[in-house]
Image (spheres, rainbow, N blue to C red):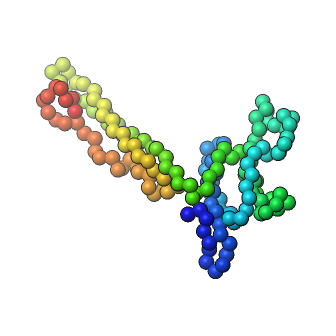
Amino acid sequence: MASRRKASGEAATKTYILELKNGDTRKITVPAHWKLTYGNVVPYAGKDQMRGGGESRVALRLYDGTKENLRAVYTDVVSFRDVAIGTLEKRTQVQRKASQRATDKGMRDVIVEARVTEWVDPDNEDAIPTPSEFKSISHRNNDDESEPF
C-alpha cells in the first residue's frame, strides 16, 4: 500500500518507484502531502542549459508545500509511479538442454527448449519464478522416428 498512516498519529506516507536512465530502480517513501514536479533539471532553461546535442536531463523534485521548501531532487529519472498503482510485468524464462541421439543414420543433435511466461509483480521479488521451478527436460527413449524426443 502506498499511502498509509503510521502508528501513534504520525503523518501518512507515499512510496514511489523511480526508474532511472542508467537502468537502476529506486524506491522512496515521503510524507503523503509532499508535492512532486517532473521536468528539466533547470526549469525553463534554453538550449544553452541542456547537455550535449540538445539532450535535457530530467529530474523529479519533491516539495514540502511550496517551491521554497524543496526537499529532494532526483536526476535522470525516466519514469516514476506510486506503488499503489498495481503493475504486472510479463517475464519469460527459457531453459535449454542439448543432447545426442543415435539413429540409423548416425548420431543426431537434439536441442529441447522450454519457455515459461508469467505475469509477475516487479515490486515483489519473492513472486518472481526461478529457473529451478522448471521441470526436468529430457528426451523420450523410443524408436518412433516421428517423435525425436
Where on the picture, by quarter, is residue 148?
top left
The N terminus - image quarter = bottom right
Where on the picture, by quarter, is residue 49?
top right
Residue 10, compared with residue 43, is above or below; it is: below
Residue 130, compared with residue 2, is above or below; it is: above
Residue 41, compared with residue 104, is above or below; it is: below
- Is 148 placed left or right of 61 in the picture? left
Number of dots carrying numbers: 0
- Is 122 placed left or right of 146 in the picture? right
Nearer to the camera, 140 or 84:
84
Observer able to see residue 101: yes
Residue name at image x 49 percent, y 49 percent: 88
**Relative image position of residue 112 (x, y in whole percent):** 30, 34
Residue 11, compared with residue 78, is above or below; it is: below
Observer able to see residue 122: no
**Relative image position of residue 59 (x, y in whole percent):** 74, 48
Where on the picture, by quarter, is residue 12?
bottom right
- Is 121 placed left or right of 115 in the picture? right
Furthest toward the left, the residue is 143
Residue name at image x 37 percent, y 43 percent: 116
Nearer to the camera, 86 or 132:
86
**Relative image position of residue 17 (x, y in whole percent):** 61, 54
Nearer to the camera, 134 or 44:
44
**Relative image position of residue 78 (x, y in whole percent):** 66, 44
Residue name at image x 64 percent, y 50 percent: 80
The C terminus - image quarter = top left
Furthest toward the top, the residue is 105
